[in-house]
Image: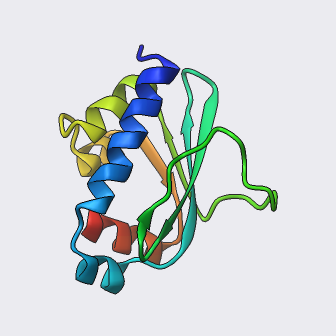
Amino acid sequence: MASVEECRAALVKLVAQFDEIDEEDRARHVVERTVSCRVSDLDVTFHGRLHHGGLDPFLEAPPADGRPADVKLTIVSDDLVALVDGELDLARALLGGRVRIDASFGDLLRLRRLL
């Protein structure tokens, strides 16, 4: 089991990876969305925001407005680290039940193009 610090580091790396996406691709496929990442085995949830400029850093504090996230990811700590490191394929993880994403169908299609 990965630690909370390792998960935090993986999410920092994910934010950096989003920064590397071509601005034109982000403009085509990104709509502003709030994102939560629940690491179920550590019972911790990180919150962030996706927008045309990229992905804001994830924080453990929920958004001030108290609204639920538009895109909710649920994953165990080891799988989060493996996913961000490119060792776990998102599509296979979804089909295998290792990752759960709760989002609209349109959001899922847009995210698929970016990941």
- Which image quarter is the N terminus in? top left
Work out whether 50 lies above or below 72.
Answer: below
Residue 16 is left or right of residue 75, and the answer is left
**Extreme residue toward the left, this view:** 87
Q: Closer to the camera, 29 or 53?
A: 53
Question: What residue is shown at x 60% (from left), y 43% (from top)?
Answer: 59
**Extreme residue toward the top, this view:** 1
- Estimate the x, y position of residue 92 in percent, counting from the top left: 24, 45
Residue 60 is left or right of residue 63, and the answer is left
Q: Is residue 72 visible?
A: yes
Number of labels in the image equals 0
Question: What residue is shown at x 40% (from left), y 31% (from top)?
Answer: 9
Q: Is residue 98 visible?
A: no
Question: What residue is shown at x 41% (from left), y 17% (from top)?
Answer: 2
Work out whether 108 lies above or below 37.
Answer: below
Colouring rule applied to residues: rainbow
Q: Closer to the camera, 79 or 23?
A: 23
Q: Closer to the camera, 55 or 95?
A: 55
- Estimate the x, y position of residue 74 in percent, counting from the top left: 52, 41
- Which image quarter is the C terminus in? bottom left
Q: Closer to the camera, 70 or 59?
A: 59
Question: What residue is shown at x 44% (from left), y 29% (from top)?
Answer: 7
Work out whether 4 lies above or below 83.
Answer: above
Work out whether 42 lies above or below 92.
Answer: above
- Estimate the x, y position of residue 58 in percent, counting from the top left: 53, 46
